[in-house]
Amino acid sequence: MLESLFLKFLPSLDPMTSAMVMLLGMPLLGFVIQIFIGKRLFRGGDWVSVGTIFVSFALSVLLFIDLLSSGPQFQWTTSWTWIDLPHFQLTMGILVDPVTILMLLVITTVSFLVFLYSIGYMHEDPRYSRYFAYLSFFSFSMIGLVLADNLFALYIFWELVGLASYLLISFWFEKPEAAEAGKKAFIVTRIGDVGMFIGILIIFFETNGLLHFDSIFSYVAKGQFGGEFLGISLLTLAGICIFLGAVGKSAQFPLHIWLPDAMEGPTPVSALIHAATMVAAGVYLVTRMFPFFTPEARTVIAYTGSFTAIFAATMALTHNDIKKVLAYSTISQLGIMMMGLGVGAYVAGFFHLVTHAAFKACLFLCAGSVIHALHTQDMREMGGIRKKMPITFTTMGVATLALSGIPFFSGFVSKDLILGESLSFAMENPSHFLIPLFGFLSTGLTAFYMFRLIFMTFYGEPRDSKKFDHAHESPWVMTLPLIILSLCSLAIFFTGSPLGLGELSLWGEKSQWVKYLLEPPSSSEHPTSAHLYALILSLTMAGCGILFAYLIYYKQTLSSEKIAEKFKCIYKTLTHLYWIDELYEWAVIHNLLRLNTLLAHFDNRVIDQVLVDGWAPITISTSTNSGDFDNRAIDQMLVDGTGKVVRASGKEVRKIQTGKIQQYLLVGLGAVCGILILLTLV
Amino acid sequence: MESLSLNLALYSPEIILSITLGFVLIVQMISQSRLFTFLTALVGLMVSAGATLAIKSFSPQFFFANQLSHDPFSLFFKLFFIIATFFTFLFSYRSYEIDEERGAEFYLLTLAVTIGMCTLVASINLLTLYLSLELVSIVSYALAGFRKEHPASNEAAIKYLLYGAFASGTMLWGLSLLYGFTGSLNIYSINATLSTASLNPLALYSMVLMVLFGFGFKITSVPFHMWAPDVYHGAPTPTAAFFTVAPKAAGFAIFIRFFYSVFANNSGLPDQWITLPHVDWAFLMAILSAVTMTLGNLSALWQKNAKRMLAYSSIAHAGYMLMGFIVLSKEGLVSILFYLVVYFFMNFGAFFVVGLLANKTKNEDISGFKGLGWTSPLVAFSMAVFLFSLTGIPPFAGFIGKVYLFSALVQKEIYWLLVVAILNTVISLYYYTYIVREMFLVKPVNSDKALVLSPLHVFTLILLVIPTFIFGLYWEPLFKYVSNSLQFIVIP
Amino acid sequence: MMFAVDLRHYLVLSAILFVLGIIGILSRKNSVGILMGIELVMNSAGINFVAFSKYVAADLSGQIFALFIFVIAASEVVIALAIILRIYQNKTTVDIEDIKDLKC
Amino acid sequence: MTYLGFIREHLLTWIVFLPVVGMAVVLFLPKEKAGLIRWTSAFFTLLSFLASLELCWAFDRSEAGLQFVEKMAWIPTFNIHYYVGCDGLSITMILLTTLLSFLCIFASWSIKEGVKGYFLMFLLLEAGMLGVFVSLDFFLFYVFWELMLLPMYFLIGIWGGPKKEYAAIKFFLYTLFGSVLMLVVMLAFYFYSEPHTFDLLELARPQILKIKDLNIFGIALTIVEFRRVLFILLFIGFAIKVPIFPFHTWLPLAHVEAPTPVSVILAGVLLKMGAYGLLRISFPILPQETYWFSYALALLGLVNIIYGAFCAMAQITLPQDRGGNDWKKLIAYSSINHMGYVLLGMAVFTTEGINGAVFQMFNHGLTTAMLFLLVGVVYDRVHHRKLDGFGGLGVQVPIYTGLVALASFASLGLPGLSSFISEALVFLGSFKVYPSITILATLGIVINAAFFLWALQKIFLGPLNAQYKNLAEVNFRELFTLVPLSVLILFFGVYPMPVLNLMKATLDRLLTLLQAA
Amino acid sequence: MTAQDVFFYIFALITLVPAFVCVFHPNILYAGLSLFGSFFGVAGIYVLLGADFIAATQVLIYVGGILVLILFAVMLSKNIYGAKFQDEKKKKILPGLLGLILLGFLVKFILTTPWNMTLTDEAPLPTVSRLGDLLLTDYLLPFELASILLLAALIGAIILARSK
């Protein structure tokens, strides 16, 4: 369909290439137009961005339809030499396979909806067109990221989405927090990126310059990827390094700290970037590189993921900021995905990415809608708006149920798959029992905090009547995306079965399209018993969670204050987010600053004034021993440098010129006698 | 009597100078006009320079009963002195230190010094050597004290005289010992005897050192340099400029001729020398060279008086030039000669600018240079050129001079001295740029007026700046001329 | 015979004279006194030349040298006295210790 | 046609001496006509730039050797020649120089006093820099090398900031120290080569340098050691210019005190000279020693990267009275960091590394130049550069903000902008040889990001500082200087091959030479 | 010890003792006067060395010219007997020491050097005519040079001494 379309309109070009270039290029075009002339366009040019992303959306839908018809073996790739040096080539290329197409679908859909939503949400903003420019840029980078056929190209777009994220988080840069958050996001993810870059370096080094996914995999498959470093095989090490990139981007522990702060950005941005797409890029990367990871590396991934899942979930418990709760939930869910990938549930992990994209985007957009209506993010100031915003409430409810993993909703499908796989993984390797444990616990916690959110926001009495009075349902550009996304959160959309159990699908295996497209034909099925246990367990956990939430926040039979009082220590820890930020603050930033200051001081005092201006060795050793460069004595000793020594000696030397001629003569004669005496002695 | 006319012909530059000397007196008495006297002196110098060029065609020989040697070496220096004197006269014109009615006396004395220097570089006989050296010195004492009302000038004169007398006395004693040991006053005979006789090294060293006292005094080498800052400082600026250039060059010339003829022998290789056995004066001089440049530069760092600073700088430059002296090769000597030419333009130029400025401010303080670059760009620019050239920065001539000196050292692999020299170059930058800084980096006070320059001054300045440039960019002819001039040893 | 006079005696005499002259130059406060020291040095050199002329060179070159030393000594003294006179007029002192304005 | 032919035959000479011609013309213009002087200078730098474009056009990219060679005897007795030519190494630098010089003329509009002198010096500076990049005779190279010092001294010293005098003399002393060491080596090369020559190509031929054992005061140096000493001397000479830690302390001072266009030239071109000198002189002539020294070079590169980054960061954290809080200084230190990548790339002798290094030189020229220009823009308006003194400018001056952001991101190595490619190439190249050093060096990437973003945040983000409510947006003239650079940064970030094509053949040959060692 | 030797020692004494006084006597007038003796002594030495003309010239120039000039200068300055002209002792220590060292070297040099003495017969006296010959032949140039020197020195002295 796609190919014929392009053959019709652009007969001279390779249809697939031009389609891909167009898919990638449209948002870029939108960006360029918006950044340069957006302000002068009608309506600030929002139609440009929405239009361009719609084209991409349409193209990816067409592509998806093609894919469904051609089956999971579909793969199309093309590449160009980008950097061509003697004995060294770097290529740029496009790889289109089911994973790519699914990602494209997710990205463009969510993008399109969020763009649409933004028209309503951002309409009063003074930098309206710039906002759309950034959004377009993000979509471009994200599409590029999934289209890339090699690690290097992927890395490029990887950084670019980071840039887009930075720009959008600090979009309201007048707020110092927003500015701070943007910077934090960029830097923290960059730490991960550096790890990834090192991974790329290792791969590049080990494979003699192969960076293509396929060639790397075949290289690994042939067992040519040898080498060790500190007793760890380089392959594992490279895998972990690559995974580090994902840790940064997908906000996994310990680099998760940026994501909650990133909520300073506009809510649609949070929905698009920090819930649905960019943060999922890490998961995408792990999926993409899946064959590359050794079992050891996968274990690391699994542990990281599961720990992040439980860890973030606990943090979400106590937060009162609606977006922050969602942010921690995102972290937690990403952790689940990572866990899934780590335990080898390749399909399940990616599946959860797709479903999560829909319901989490929906959740964020709903939250945005609420915020838009109430002008606050604090749940304690909300309450009882169920009636005033029925669409929002309904869609959010659907998404919440999906997130909590309740049957009939998409979250149930994918999460259950992951949990089942992790359980069976743990059954095979009992020593790794913590992984599923964390997973199941986090499910319960998720249900708890999500329902807490719902109850606090939509039920009960309005806590701030002034805000409540102003509240109203959002315009259609905002609600439409909500509805579409909530529809996508239904299990039937993914499985063809209303309940969400794949086995009961209505339209054959193709209706379970994610699974159908991704499942490697040869993959062995895990014993279903594990799945069953998992099903029961997770449902129980979710049920418990909902129950507690209901009791505490709806019925208020259990007082949250009392519980907080009782578990004060834990509560405090949780509200302080485990003091992670404080730890970083103390451990990294503080010490880094001290190091900086020290070094700068070092530069001023020691290098400049001692080594260069100064006579070095004696003073250096004393200064390093004391370590305190502020020390007055050293200061006074060091200040004089070579320059000053020279000048001082100049000052001394000229004193021999006393003005007394007889002394001059004495010097001359003395020198003669001196030389003669010296000669007699020698 | 044919030989007498030949002798006179070969001595014609000096004779013309003596005639000019007389004419200057007469013209001054008759016309009472400074300008005429000035022109007379200049014309005399030009004729003398012409004569110097003319007698180049005579083959190298000894004349005046082996008292003097006619060779390219001496001709080069004669020309050098005549040109230096020429510039000194240009400099002195309208200088506030050489007042109007005493111009003729100034010319007369300076001409006498020039005659002495011209004879000095040609002399190969101890007596002529001593006599011409004393002619240079004694008249210089009078020149240093030329501003007789000025205590500084008096002081310069007495210091110069006392140091000079002491130095020449010591040297005289040394010369007498040489004479006593060899029984001859001719330097070649002395060398012949010295190189065959077996002398106690210590005795030889004593002679070398005593003679060195006299020569070191002239070239301002440490430790015989101490008079120089005071004398250059106190003497009238044109004279000081003259002193730092001409007598120093004369000192170098005779130093080279004497040491290379008396205390060294040809090593067998062309253009290479070796010192007399057991008397490694080259090494001694190398150390003195290092100390000289270092001391000169270090002392210059803190000077507040431009003239005094330049005086120290001229000591440092003597140290640089000594580097060429110690390598005992033609390359080294050529580099000294080359450097002298270059040094003349830049050092004289720097003094000239100081003098121009002093004509306005009546002193030579460096603070007087403040903002000069903004009020009188031409003068300041020239000064900057001279100073950078003195530092040894391309594309100015001073750099080329240094390159030749350094390359002489590299060829002989005397790297330690080279390192001292380059470090000194860096140090010297500091005080040279101090003046540049005052001129350009400091904005002038509103009341500062531009220097009033007569066309003659501008002309002189340009005449000094242009070679400083040209020889930095294209010095091939000069180098060829200089290396051809290095034939001073005529086998008797 | 140590007392039999030959060249060395003259030389030693001249050396003593020379050193005396030098000490005079270096230690006299009065600049005229320094001049006297210079004269002694000159004289000692003269003795040297004449002695060498007789004992070594066996010609009159040394004597001629001595003659010219007189000439130089005379002119030097003339100039020196002129300068000293000048200084005396300007500063009313001829003490060399007081003439040290130019220094450093 | 024949005229054109004549120009083309002596293209390099034209490029180098057109600024000198411009100087001569400016010299005769009356001092009061500032506008005329500016436009005349602009005209001649433009001519030079156009000529270099022509050079680029006519340049044979597949040829590794030298092209456009002109050789004339200059001082036959000393075997010095006017010998110029260009290859892939120098052509990028020539382009960079002519471009930046041309743009800087427009950035010099804000110079108000001593306009004539300023432009005279500036043109001389350009000629000197170009001369360095085209010289193939060591002597000529040295003359040009030093020739730059003088105008630089004046440009910093006269038109610089509050501590200009100190900065100028420090720069001067430092670089002079470096160059006299180079002078020693130059003379040693001359006298040890048989036949004596200053010809850099001749000297690079094996067996031409016949270095002997040396004995200085009883310290015996064997041939190998002596060659190493020569290498180190030469290296110090170049290291000061690069500048390599610990010879870098002149740099922050000079950059900070210099007027904007001069900082641009300093960072954009002058710093490259050190690295260029290493590649042009040290590497080919002393390949074994280069090999011997390569590990140290890589380590120094690492130190530069980390140390420069930390010091740049300190600008944010240190209060002003302790030498911090200066935006320009931050960029200056980041230059040290960036030159570290160049060193690292040069030290490893791999295709990627060396191409990356030279490309990084080029890119650093573009990005840092742009950053300095941008600092100049705001400095002209508010007369300070305190990082703390701004705040929220993003609202007031969006275009300016965008440009600064672009330059900063380019500088921190964001993909899609040119520096990324060169840094990535360097890392790819160096990881093969020195994995541990490379991994440590990647730390620099993070710190780079940190301080650039931090600076951006302090200056542009947050609430608008009320003081700057009326801050004017970049004007057309400033845009004229900035836009070409941004376009190039973007373009080469996406498609670097035009530059890499120019140099790859030459660098490949250099590499073969080094690998043979 | 021949008569000549005796005369030598006498003249040496006449030379050295006044020289000693000249150098070390605190009063400048005495110093100047004692110089008189020293010059005579040197003249005597010259006579012993067979240089009659030189001896005569020595007396004429030194005693008649130079010494008179010096004394004239001494007299010109007032306060001859004042404290100003009394030298301190301390100043003489270092120069004396150096002088002694130098003397040591010189004497050692004089005594150890194998002088190349070719003296066989006494040079005939008087030497005047031969000196005159030499001065107009071999030493013509120095002779002329000396005249320039004297002229210049004279003019220089006049310039300096003449008051404005």
Image (cartoon, rainbow, N blue to C red):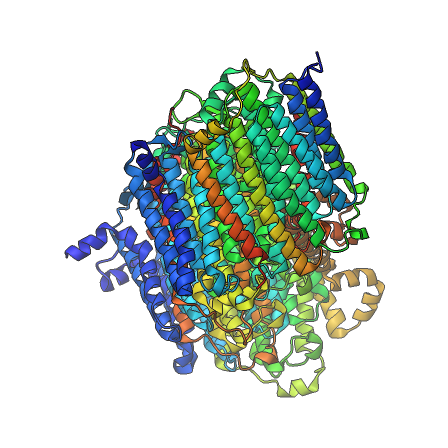
Q: Which of the 4 quarters of the picture holds residue B443?
A: bottom right
The one of D512 and B240 positioned closer to us in this rendering = B240
Q: Is residue B236 visible?
A: yes
Instruction: Give residue D322's position: percent from left, percent from top.
Output: 68, 61
Please state, as top left, top right, bottom left or bottom right, where the N terminus of chain B lies in the image: top left
Q: Is residue D434 visible?
A: no
Instruction: Indicate left or right for D328 with B399 as reference.
Output: right
The one of B32 and A376 positioned closer to us in this rendering = B32
In the rendered image, the residue lying farthest to the top is: C1
Please state, as top left, top right, bottom left or bottom right, where the C terminus of chain B lies in the image: top left
The one of D119 and A13 positioned closer to us in this rendering = D119
Instruction: Give residue A450's position: percent from left, percent from top.
Output: 66, 67
Residue at (71% x, 23% y) in the render: E9
Residue at (70% x, 71% y) in the render: A320
Instruction: Indicate left or right for B253 with A279 as reference.
Output: left
Instruction: Indicate left or right for D38 with A633 as reference.
Output: left
The one of B232 and D254 positioned closer to us in this rendering = B232
Q: Which of the 4 quarters of the picture holds residue B403?
A: top left
Residue at (37% x, 27% y) in the render: B490
How many numbered marks does the figure carry? Answer: 0
In the rendered image, the residue lying farthest to the right is: A566
Q: Is residue D217 above or below residue D38?
A: above
Instruction: Give residue D381's position: percent from left, percent from top.
Output: 52, 75
Instruction: Give residue A289's position: percent from left, percent from top.
Output: 49, 46
